[in-house]
Amino acid sequence: MYCDSIVTGDAGWIWHQVLEDFKTHRKLRKHYNSIVGAPQANKFFPDRQIYDGKKYLDVGLIQFGRGCKFACSFCAISSYFNKQQFVRDLDSVLEEIIMLKNKLIFFVDDNICADFEALKDLCRTLIPLKIRWVSQGSMDMTKDPELMELLVKSGCMGNVIGFETINPSNARQLRKAPNFFRKDFSLYEKEVGTLRHFGLQTWAAFTLGYDNDTRDSILSTVEYAIQQKFCFAAFNILVPYPNTPMYKKMEEEGRLLFDGKWWLHPSYRFNHCSYKPKCMTPDELTELSFECKEKWNSWKSILYRYFDTKTHMRNLVKSAIYWTYNPIYSKENFSKQDMYFGIYNHLDKEKGLIHKNETLLLNPDLSNIDDIKPKMKNHNFTIEDNVDLTLNYEKQTTTV
Ligand code: SF4
């Protein structure tokens, strides 16, 4: 491992204990185990002053709920929260929103509409505040006209929605109930029509590399997204997250690459394929995903998508959102491609995998430095034999 202490579960409920241990004893326990699923510890609000003067988007991040009731086969959220959603007390959410200074709020929920009635209550609470907000939600929101009305009235500008695939033969593998709830699947025509009718600007999230995906089906996905004139879109390769049904199945089938642990592997790079797809090679899938991003982010595509009077041209605010964030996301898309993960991203490739912040890595306060040492040696990171790695305090093994 690359840390000397680990918190599992929802950190908000135990973080004060971690800080207390550090302040009082200068010791951390090896493992802090918190509860899973309870929404944000309501008494504590984040101190957002730490963002002042830094280059963050002018968007206020806040959480209404955690988790999701669905059981999509690839989803780490579903596995972690055991197919449940937990929402916060509305008074506390309201109090936190009033403290925010941002003009736009992003509810960073996993699926804000996992419970329609809870979301309706939130919307009713938001209406008098006259804020603008965005979030992440599932496609089935379009089934409920009252919910759609309330979303708009409460200031919702749009949502990230997991379209995942336009190829119905992938439905069985995905097991995404909110997308395939009707028998006559026709490229989400009705659902997209409803979103446009209400003027919501959609961020369509697609995942590429299902068992029935071919080069043609993937390229037709990006063409579809451009034709629908979505505001934003993502074309990410399917990722087998540990403990998900999809991971377990691929493991059984012997299809996982990087020793089945892509997130720890020194060669794994962001948005690269980490398993053996059925209809192409892993490298072909990686390249195809990049090709989709290039097509989507081209100026031709951005200009074409803008001309939609029901969404981006509906008013000046929506127009401003379109033109402010499209160039930002486009740049970010390319800058993240091929990034190394975690500690490997901080290795200086030009100097032969020497860590950029050697002093931090060799800080003798790190109680697990002995664990790090042999692992790093494997990857040509040399630690001189005469460096003093004596710990300042004895190892703590107590668990909570
Ligand atoms: S709807 Fe979204 S958040 Fe919910 S289980 Fe499926 S992928 Fe996960």
Image (tube, rainbow, N blue to C red):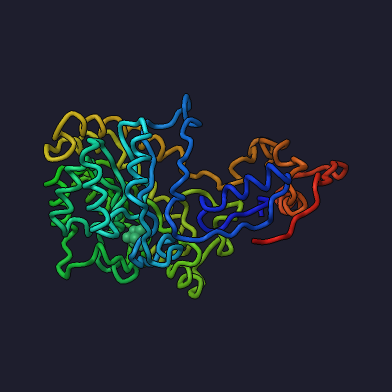
- The image shows residue 339, relative to residue 38, as above or below, that is above
The residue that appears at 38% across and 34% down in the rendered structure is 99
Name the side, left or right, on which 212 lies relative to 148: right
The residue that appears at 49% across and 68% down in the rendered structure is 255
Name the side, left or right, on which 47 lies relative to 181: right
Q: Residue farthest to the bottom?
A: 252
Residue 242: horizontal and vertical position, in percent?
50, 64
Q: Residue farthest to the right?
A: 386
Residue 294: horizontal and vertical position, in percent?
34, 41
Q: In which quarter of the image is ligand 1?
A: bottom left
The residue that appears at 56% across and 52% down in the rendered structure is 14
Which quadrant is home to the C terminus? bottom right
Identify the image quadrant of residue 152: top left
Visible residue check, residue 151: yes
Visible residue check, residue 300: no
Residue 183: horizontal and vertical position, in percent?
17, 70
